[in-house]
Image: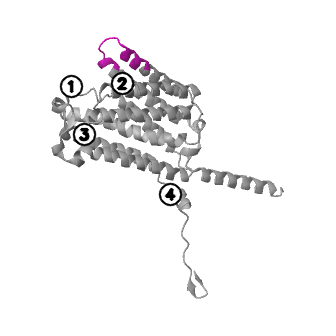
Amino acid sequence: MRENGFLEKPQRKNKKEYFMKKKVNIVPAAAFAASLIAVIFRVFQLLVVVDYGEMGFFDFNAGFFACYGLYIFFAVAALILTAGVILDNTKMNDAYVCGVKSLTSKQTAALGISFLLAACLKLYDVVFGFRGVSLDFVGEAVIFAVFALIGFMLLSRKSVRPSAGYMQLLIAVSFTVKAAALFMQDTIIVRVSDELILLLSYIASTLFFLALGRFLSCNESKHTRGKLFVCGGAAAMFSCSASLAGLIARLIDSRYMEGHTAMHPLSQIGAAIIAFTVIVILYSKRKSYTERLEELENQSENEEKSDEMPQV
């Protein structure tokens, strides 16, 4: 506009208003993209860079980026997930506002199916990894039962009971025990990529299921939702790198991968399935909190106007 013969300088939009109007959600896209890229990179490492003839160390003749580029990508992806949580939260998306009671029956059922899929993968490892009755076998069987029980609980009810959240603690404890055992059994775990990535997946899964337990049991703190998304995205990325990449590499070259599948447990993919399901479910609602408030205000105004109109 012209004012007093001069062009008026256009006002720059507020950053918060800009992000609130954006419809693209960063966290789901970042989690899926990071997991896909990590799997492709890890398959390449397993078939080309990792030397199982030398205890699973890297073949440094492949170059620095081929050996350590995946770790750099992990760090960048974690930063992007954290930034995505912050930016998505500024839009006051339903994913950060609505509680567990806002989940529909279909969303609850989808979450239950993800736990049942995780239970099936756990059962596969329990059955085909059986080497006799031991403490590890009993622990894995118990966690299989926990996954299955949570899945059936969510499928049989239209709403989530707090007990489903409290049972997440058992899953978190199992991942903690696994992480501690893996770390204690090998003092050079940092140099062996298979063990290090699996350890990272256990740690991220522990944090994810702790946050998921607080969400499902309605015991969230101020930053629980952000932790749920960051740790969920990280758990999905690390779990896919540790397990799904190993499965794909075994399908491509079974001879080379034979005898080295212990560090690629199929059941770890279950954690990624649950993490993806939680992220998709909570981000599935398109309307932001502010948009819903505006709709309620407009609805109340229309009702007031209709009440004020004189009746004939």
Asked if residue 246 lies in the magenta stretch, the reply is: no
Cα distance, mark 3 to mark 4?
Answer: 35 Å
Ranked by sequence position, the earlier of labels 2 and 4 is 4
Report whether residue 97 is seen.
yes
Q: Residue at x 37, y 40 (%)?
A: 237
> Relative to residue 258, is residue 292 depicted above or below?
below
CA gap, disc 3 and disc 1: 17 Å
Q: Are marks 3 and 2 in contact (CB under 8 Å)?
A: no
Q: Which residue is mark 2?
A: 181
Foreground pick, 115 / 204: 204
Q: Amino acid at mark 3?
A: Val
Picture residue at 41% right of the left edge, 50% below the top: 80
Is residue 157 shown left or right of residue 296?
A: left
Q: Using the numbered discs, state the Cα–Cα distance from disc 1 to disc 2 in whole angstroms.
A: 20 Å
**Residue linked to disc 4:** 22
Whole-angstrom CA distance, mark 2 to mark 4, is 45 Å
Read off the magenta span. Answer: 126-142
Specify few, some or many for label 1: CA neighbours under 10 Å numbering under 14, 14-19, or 20 or more: few
Query: At which x and y percent is residue 223?
Result: 55, 42
